[in-house]
Image: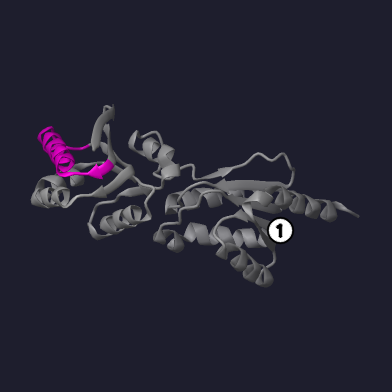
């Protein structure tokens, strides 16, 4: 089943539900032909959070109309795909990587708000807001949370936010809470801004608490903490208050005569 709706003058949302059948594929092809005739362009959000599978007939008819679909896809400005299925997200990222000059922004179900903001052109970047500051009312402690995927742009923005907070000489403790992390784009690794920012933080931090995230983060935090200046400790997500207490305790010890 499929539903195609216009959500803004430039954007459409295509929702796939239950089993994706031949008639659903035909509806997308007809829509693509209509958009091509109108000159193309615009933004599209594919919502596949409720799709149960694809029939052979649906795949066959799409393959028979590849030129039409390719012209439509390449004419789009923003393309966002939401799915709660890992194989759909992985397949979409792989297809995006293999098609030259074309980029799909792929989101998990809990990132639906970011996906909609991207195709509605309400956000500066596809993952803007994934990294954001928290208000914990603890002087001397900078706290941030991660609630999505980190691309290069958002990683650089996040590093800049942390560095700005640590410009305050009295702030030398940092907490990052990983609530919903969906990985990072590979080119983030090659960002000179991110690398310089991390090196700068190493010299300024006394303690660094990482809360939540994948299990391997704890092991990595312990290994890095043994080699570098900051005292780094990992906490489970439900132990966020304990992490704040640990950072505040450090502050009290540092301030003692």
Residue position for label 1? 207
Left or right of 210 in this view: 148: left
Residue in view at x 27 percent, y 55 percent: 96
Q: In this orientation, which residue lies closer to the viewer: 47 or 204?
A: 47
Q: Is residue 243 left or right of residue 163?
A: right
- Which quadrant of the figure has residue 214? bottom right
Residue 121 position in % (x across, y down): 35, 35
Q: Which residues are magenta?
A: 18-41
The crowd level at tag 1 (other Cα within 10 Å; few <14, some 14-19, many 20+) is many
Residue 56 vertical placement versus 137 (above, below): below
Magenta run includes residue 35: yes
Image quadrant where residue 95 sits: bottom left
Please provide percent x and percent y for residue 66: 12, 50
Residue drawn 29% across the image and 39% down it: 17
Label the magenta part by its dominant secondary structure.
helix
| Color style of the picture | one colour
Compare residues 164 and 180 and report the one nearer the observer: 180
Measured as percent of width and height from the top left, residue 167 is found at: 66, 49
Q: In the displayed structure, does residue 12 sit left or right of residue 229? A: left
Residue 61 place in picture, x, y as percent: 11, 48
In depth, the one of 99 and 191 nearer the eye is: 99
Say which element carries label 1: strand
Q: Is residue 34 visible?
A: yes
Give the residue displayed 12% in from the left and 37% down from the top. Answer: 30
Q: In the picture provided, is 157 more to the left or to the right than 229?
A: left
Based on the picture, tell me whether residue 23 belongs to the magenta stretch. yes
Q: How many marks?
A: 1
Question: Is residue 124 at all visible to an observer of this figure?
Answer: no
Residue at x 66% of width, y 62% of height: 203
């Amino acid at each position: 089943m499929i539903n195609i709706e216009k959500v803004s003058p430039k954007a459409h949302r295509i929702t796939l539900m239950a089993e994706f059948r031949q008639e659903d594929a035909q509806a997308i092809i007809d829509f693509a032909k209509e958009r091509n005739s109108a000159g193309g362009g615009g933004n599209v959000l594919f919502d596949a959070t409720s799709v149960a599978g694809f029939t052979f007939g649906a795949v066959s008819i799409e393959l028979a109309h590849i030129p039409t679909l390719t012209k439509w896809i390449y004419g789009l400005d923003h393309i966002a795909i939401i799915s709660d299925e890992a194989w759909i997200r992985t397949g979409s990222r792989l297809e995006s990587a293999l098609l030259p000059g074309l980029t799909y922004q792929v989101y998990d179900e809990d990132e639906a708000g970011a996906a909609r903001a991207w195709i509605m052109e309400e956000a500066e970047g596809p993952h803007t807001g994934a990294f954001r500051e928290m208000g914990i009312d603890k002087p001397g402690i900078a706290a941030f949370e991660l609630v999505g995927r980190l691309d290069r742009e958002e990683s650089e923005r996040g590093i800049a936010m942390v560095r700005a907070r640590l410009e305050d000489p009295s702030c030398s403790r940092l907490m990052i809470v990983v609530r919903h992390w969906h990985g990072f784009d590979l080119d983030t690794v090659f960002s000179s801004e991110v690398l310089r920012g991390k090196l700068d933080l190493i010299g300024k931090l006394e303690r660094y608490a990482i809360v939540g995230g994948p299990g391997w983060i704890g092991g990595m935090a312990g290994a890095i903490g043994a080699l570098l200046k900051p005292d780094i400790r990992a906490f489970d997500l439900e132990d966020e208050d304990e992490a704040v207490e640990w950072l505040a305790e450090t502050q009290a010890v540092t301030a003692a005569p």
